[in-house]
Image: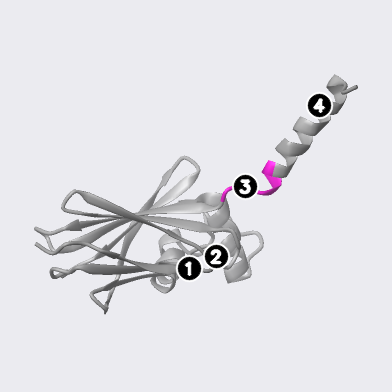
Amino acid sequence: MVTSFSILSFVHSIVFALMLHPLHVSVTEIEYDEKDKVLEIMMRVFIDDLELTMRNRLNQPELDITEPKGVTLDQIMAPYLEEHLKIVLDKKAQKIKYLGHEKEGEAFIFFIEVSNVKKWKAIQVMNNIIMETHEDQSNLVHVTVRGKVKSLRLTKSTPADVLTFDAK
């Protein structure tokens, strides 16, 4: 006979297990602005995941990523993103330019661009942010070209992948 106490215990254990294994995900949106010849990139990252990663990376266990002392978040993130986000167009590496960030709820949105983009067919995206901290990190990437959206799910085992678009 199952008692309400044992059912409640079971439910609590499931809730506790879910709390121990949260979802680790970022979302990156890349839009090709053909007129201005630029890739506009917005990356959303959960603050708590980023904070843990930066604490480990910078060896600063007390770091408050929302108000870092002696340095700005932009000074922390520009080199980190340059290392962990790579864009290749038709097998030619592109230089990313970090533009800044804003806070939105429990996430930061980072603004990045690639300028002087000529027509291309294939885009390779490498995005391995947070993967040094969370083995189960998934980085979703949505690329929009002339209104058509294609997506990637990048993981520790597959941190880079290629999407192909029709050239016009």
> In what element is the residue under mark 1?
loop
Q: In the rendered structure, which disc, 1 or 4, sits on the residue that comes first in sequence?
A: 4
**Horizontally, is 27 left or right of 68 in the view?**
left
The amino acid at mark 3 is Pro
Toward the viewer: 103 or 87? 87
Mark 2 and mark 1: span between their CA atoms? Answer: 11 Å
**Nearer the camera: disc 1 or disc 3:** 1
Question: Range of the magenta residues?
Answer: 18-23
Label 4 with label 2: CB-CB less than 8 Å: no
The disc label shown at residue 131, or none:
2
Q: Residues within 10 Å of mark 2 (few under 14, many from 20)?
A: many
Mark 1 and mark 4: span between their CA atoms? Answer: 40 Å
- Work out whether residue 126 can be spotted: yes
Q: In the rendered structure, which disc, 1 or 3, sits on the residue that comes first in sequence?
A: 3
| Residue that numbered label 3 is attached to | 22
**Nearer the camera: disc 3 or disc 4:** 4
Mark 3 and mark 4: span between their CA atoms? Answer: 23 Å
The amino acid at mark 1 is Thr
> In what element is the residue under mark 2?
loop
Question: What residue sits 54% from the left and 58% below the top?
Answer: 137
**Nearer the camera: disc 4 or disc 2:** 4
Toward the viewer: 37 or 168? 168
Return the x and y of residue 101 as percentages of the image width and height: 37, 54
Mark 3 and mark 2: span between their CA atoms? Answer: 14 Å
Q: In the rendered structure, which disc, 3 or 4, sits on the residue that comes first in sequence?
A: 4
Q: Quadrant of residue 141?
A: bottom left
**Nearer the camera: disc 2 or disc 1:** 1
Label 2 with label 1: CB-CB less than 8 Å: no
Residue 19 highlighted magenta (yes or no): yes
Which quadrant is the C terminus positioned in?
bottom left
| Residue that numbered label 4 is attached to | 7
Q: Residues within 10 Å of mark 1 (few under 14, many from 20)?
A: few
